[in-house]
Amino acid sequence: MNTKKKLEDEINFRDMLKNPLRLFGWVFPIIIVVMIGLGVYYVKNLSLISLNTQPVNAPDTTNIKKEVALKLGGITPAIDMAVIKNPTKEFIAKGKTLYDSNCKSCHGDNGLGDGSAGAMLNPKPRNFHTVDGWTNGRTIDKMYKTLQEGIIKNGMAAYEYLPSGDRMAIISYIRTFVEFPPIKDEELASLDQTYQLSKGTVVPNTIPVATAEKKLSDENYAAVKKISEAKQFLAASRENIGAELIKKSAQDVDKVISSFINGMQNQSVDNFASLVTANPLNYGFKPTVSRYSKDDLAQIYSYLKTVTM
């Protein structure tokens, strides 16, 4: 009798459950199937996965618009240059207050460039503790230039709206963070000569950016409306000598009217005639207007004066 165990024609899964080691051979096929499935999923969703893993671009700091407060201009008090060279505790304390309200949000509490508002800026705000990489330099005259003019490419706004004494106080406080180059007399002399600090600085009136934009928009709308109304009046005018002369001599009616409104309205009739005949194209007229008589030019002037009032 053959005592050898017969080969099984079919897999008896119940027997395999009784002997779990026999299931080990199925692990590898299952892993391969799972990996193939994951690979297919990855390939089909490659574009979406790549899109979601792209780093967020930092904002362009050159497009940051810094709001300006409404402020009446005038002449700021003269600065005692001796205080700049040897700032008092009170002057430095004033600088700290101004720094906290104007600079800390970007440059950080201790001037390390780690302020919360500067986290997403590119390039990062200036770290005042570092010696290298200063665009304008670390001397006091260059630091003042930075506050006066700003550095557009680095996203540094200009603080020319602050009184010169306040800017100097901020600089004096910043210079307490680390050791800065000593203040030289020639640097103070250059500052004084350039910005007239010891004589007082003329500060222009400032208005918020949004207000300025609205004002410009309103003025532009008013000018366009005025030109449009004058053109309509001119087109409807009949048997008016001045209107007929303009229609014949105008190369660009819009330019004729806008030039008159923007610069010639307050000129005398003689000055108007001289300007138009000397350079007619510049004021929207054809060259033939140069041959007009003084009376004809007076008629044109009178009509333009009437329709643009």
Image: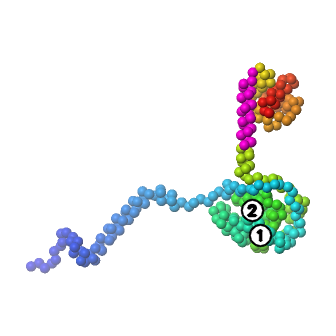
Q: Of 261 and 16, which appears nearest the observer?
A: 261
Q: Nearer the viewer, mark 2 or mark 1?
A: 1
Q: Which residue is mark 2?
A: 135
Q: Residue furthest right?
A: 199
Q: Which residues are magenta?
A: 218-238
Residue 77, percent from left and from top: 87, 61
Q: Main secondary structure of the magenta part?
A: helix
Please tell me which residue is depicted at 30% across the width and 70% down the height of the picture: 26
Looking at the image, residue 120 lies above or below residue 250: below
* Amino acid type, label 2: Thr
> Where on the picture, by quarter, is residue 179?
bottom right
Q: Secondary structure at mark 1?
A: helix
Residue 309, percent from left and from top: 80, 33
Looking at the image, residue 109 lies above or below residue 56: below
Q: How many marks?
A: 2
Residue 220 among magenta residues: yes
Please tell me which residue is depicted at 86% across the width and 62% down the height of the picture: 191
Please tell me which residue is depicted at 24% across the width and 77% down the height of the picture: 18
User: Is 101 situated left or right of 188 in this image?
Assistant: left
Q: Which residue is mark 1?
A: 96
Q: Of 278 and 206, which appears nearest the observer?
A: 206
* Amino acid type, label 1: Lys
Question: CA separation, marks 2 and 1?
Answer: 23 Å
Callouts 2 and 1 close, C-beta under 8 Å: no
> Where on the picture, by quarter, is residue 178?
bottom right
Inspect this view and state whether residue 143 appears.
yes
